[in-house]
Structures are given as C-alpha cells and as structure tokens.
C-alpha cells in the first residue's frame, strides 16, 4: 500500500449510486494524466468515515507501484464506478 493522504470529495449531484461508508476500492482518474484515461486509471482505497455531499476521506493507492507523484496537495481526481463518474476530489495539504 502507498502513503495515506486526506482528500476532500464532492459527490456528483445526479449520482444515484449509494455513497459508501467505510473502506471502498474504486477507480480514480487524476487530472495530471486525464488525457491517458482509461489506460492511466488507478485503483485507490478510500476510507469514508461519514457520508454527505462533501466528505473528507483517507485515500491511498491500492498498489505499491502506483505513481505517488500524482498525490500532492491540490492534486485533483475523479472517482468512478465502472464508466460512471460518482465523485470529484482534491488532495488536501
């Protein structure tokens, strides 16, 4: 597992998916490599301690070889369930 960082997540308003509570593995698309989607999709482990429209979560890559240079303060990302965008996020300082 990679380092754990805090992130702010905003749920997509028209998302009819159930918002998770607890640990959840999902696909992430990082803004820095957005043009390479979906070949640059990365599995992340998101720990949701609470669920509302804006959540502060613990986030880390699922695999050790993932590019940790994508996780820095201000880095933006999207979370997906399959091809469906479910949330947008930003790494906090």
Image (spheres, rainbow, N blue to C red):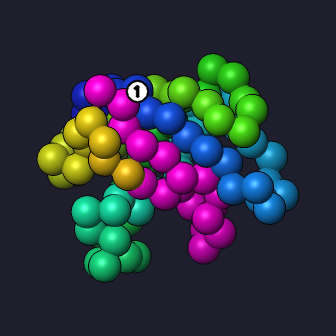
For this rendering, which residue is in front, 17 or 8? 8
Q: Residue at x 48, y 46 (%)?
A: 89
Task: Characterize the magenta stretch by its predominant secondary structure.
Answer: strand
Q: Is residue 15 above or below residue 50?
A: below
Q: Position of residue 86 (x, y in %)?
A: 65, 57
Q: Position of residue 29 (x, y in %)?
A: 41, 62
In this view, the residue farthest toward the top is 49
Residue under label 1, please give it: 6
Q: Is residue 65 visible?
A: no
Element assignment for label 1? strand
For this rendering, which residue is in front, 71 or 24? 71
Q: Quadrant of the N terminus?
A: top left
Q: Quadrant of residue 37?
A: bottom left
Q: Is residue 75 above or below residue 27?
A: above
On screen, residue 3 versus residue 27, left or right, reads left
- Please give the range of residues in magenta: 77-93
For this rendering, which residue is in front, 26 or 53? 53
On screen, residue 72 versus residue 88, left or right, reads left
Q: Residue at x 65, y 35 (%)?
A: 54
In this view, the residue farthest toward the right is 16
Q: Quadrant of residue 31?
A: bottom left
């Amino acid at each position: 597992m990679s380092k754990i960082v805090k992130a702010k997540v905003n749920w997509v308003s028209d998302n009819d998916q159930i918002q998770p509570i607890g640990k959840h593995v999902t696909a992430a698309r990082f803004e820095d490599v957005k043009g390479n989607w979906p070949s640059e999709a990365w599995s992340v482990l998101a720990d949701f301690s609470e669920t509302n429209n804006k959540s502060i979560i613990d986030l880390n890559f699922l695999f050790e070889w993932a590019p940790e240079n994508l996780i820095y303060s201000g880095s933006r990302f999207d979370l997906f369930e399959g091809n469906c965008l479910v949330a947008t996020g930003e790494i906090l300082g």
